Image (cartoon, grey):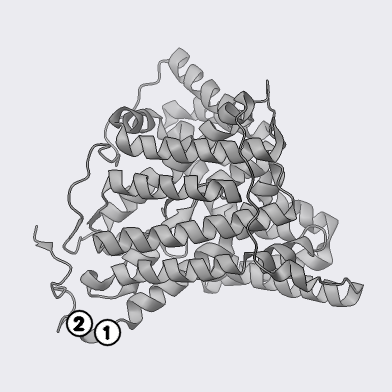
Amino acid sequence: MRHETPTDPAPDAPGGGREGWSRPVSAGVVSALVGFTSAFVVVLAGLTSVGADPDQASSGLLAVSVTMGLSCIVLAWSTRMPITAAWSTPGAALLATTGAVDGGWPAAVGAFLVTGALVVLTGLVPQLGALIARIPASVAQAMLAGVLLQLCLGPVTGLAANPAGVVPVVVVWLLALRLAPRWAAPLAFVTAAVVIGVHVVTSGVAVDAAALVPRVELTAPTLTPGAVVGVALPLWLVTMASQNVPGVAVMKGLGYEVPWRRSMLVTGTATVVGAPAGGHAVNLAAISAALAAGPEAGADRARRWVASVTAGVVLVVLGVASAAFGTLVALAPAGVVPAVAGLALLGTLAASLRAALAAPAEQLPAVVVFATAASGVAVAGVSAAFWALLAGLVVRAVLGVRRPRGGDVPDPVDDRPARHAGPQPAEGAVAARVHGGRDA
């Protein structure tokens, strides 16, 4: 297979660079808008759940948006590949179901710091990468599905609590899912914004202009055993197993070999830097990676890295507007915001359940993991996600279930010079498979 350099005219683009920069730039804008609007309500819900007040939650949204945007720019610029970073949506969902943390918000911030340090160590220490690779996919996906279940009930509970406000959101989401799947979650959010606007006008609620100004709320971190074991470890595991490893696999399917160590160092450092301001976790984009790395970013593969740089710039701009988004969510009538979050995560829940139950021998352990994680019960200050993982591994061991061979697991010591392969036969298939998706 011929390996192209970033300056080579793409063989599938007659005339090389004649198509210009418009397609990668537009793909980057779409990638950022879809990724942000699809899941920012989940991020705010997660931060609030573990103890952040509205100002701290808005600060966390700003921090994670800016750091993931800068990570996109650094990775794409340094590798000349369309590598896209994202916040950990599964991690935010995990936080939303974790509840109050032993030690409060400062302990949650400490857990975010530990998570970033673990990601950095995963890039530096091969054994940690091997540990992640040994977690059965069925267990990891069942844990994620259990975490997501409570959030995905949001549309149902919202319809019961406030049908007038939630029905328009669900109807628009359903129609968009049929006509423009990629934009289903963003359009649901736009509809929710209209519902919130109508609510504000009709109820006479005053909006404080000062609340719309972006601000950074720094918090001195503390470390507690409950936060480290119950938040940091599950957050690291779900981020690695549900974002970073699949992100590398998606990029490989599109013909790009992502430098593992460099990616972990950049995203882990971004997590550490953003943690004191409330940012929970930055990682490689998984499903939405194809929006910047696939054919929609242009036929000239050598220019697709511009899409990731563009996405990074747009994410930084959206992060600056985080206070306005936080204020909008705070003004929402009952049921509307949980409904939007649940609709955005339904596709991820379906994919997780499908992966968890794919192998007959894995089904019983997976169901145990799913039920434990979905219970939301914390024991000894440790979240249900950790106990779900432990329960699944114990049941697998007792039943003698063997780990399947193979899989798209990155070599944890692989950090060869950045490159991208020539067009792959699977590129179109991968793009179609992830078309309209969001990071999970």
Say which of 317 and 406 sits in front.
Answer: 317
On the picture, is 125 further left or further right than 375?
A: left
Q: Position of residue 384 (x, y in %)?
A: 63, 29
> Measured along the vertical axis of the image, is residue 297 above or below residue 238?
below
Q: Residues within 10 Å of mark 2 (few under 14, many from 20)?
A: some
> Measured along the vertical axis of the image, is residue 401 above or below residue 83?
above
Q: Secondary structure at mark 1?
A: loop
Residue under circle 1?
Answer: 20
On the picture, is 292 further left or further right than 57?
A: left
Q: Position of residue 357 (x, y in %)?
A: 48, 36
Say which of 384 and 365 sits in front.
Answer: 384
Q: Residues within 10 Å of mark 1 (few under 14, many from 20)?
A: few
Residue under circle 2?
Answer: 17
Say which of 14 and 16 sits in front.
Answer: 16
Q: Secondary structure at mark 2?
A: helix
Q: Amino acid at mark 1?
A: Gly
Name of the residue lying farthest toward the top: 398
Q: Amino acid at mark 2?
A: Gly
Name of the residue lying farthest toward the left: 2
Q: Are marks 1 and 2 in contact (CB under 8 Å)?
A: yes
Q: CA distance from mark 1 to mark 2?
A: 6 Å
On the picture, is 274 further left or further right than 28?
A: right
Q: Position of residue 381 (x, y in %)?
A: 68, 25
Residue at 74%, 50% in the rendered image: 53
Per the rendering, the mark at residue 330 is none
Say which of 250 and 63 sits in front.
Answer: 63
Q: Position of residue 148 (x, y in %)?
A: 60, 44
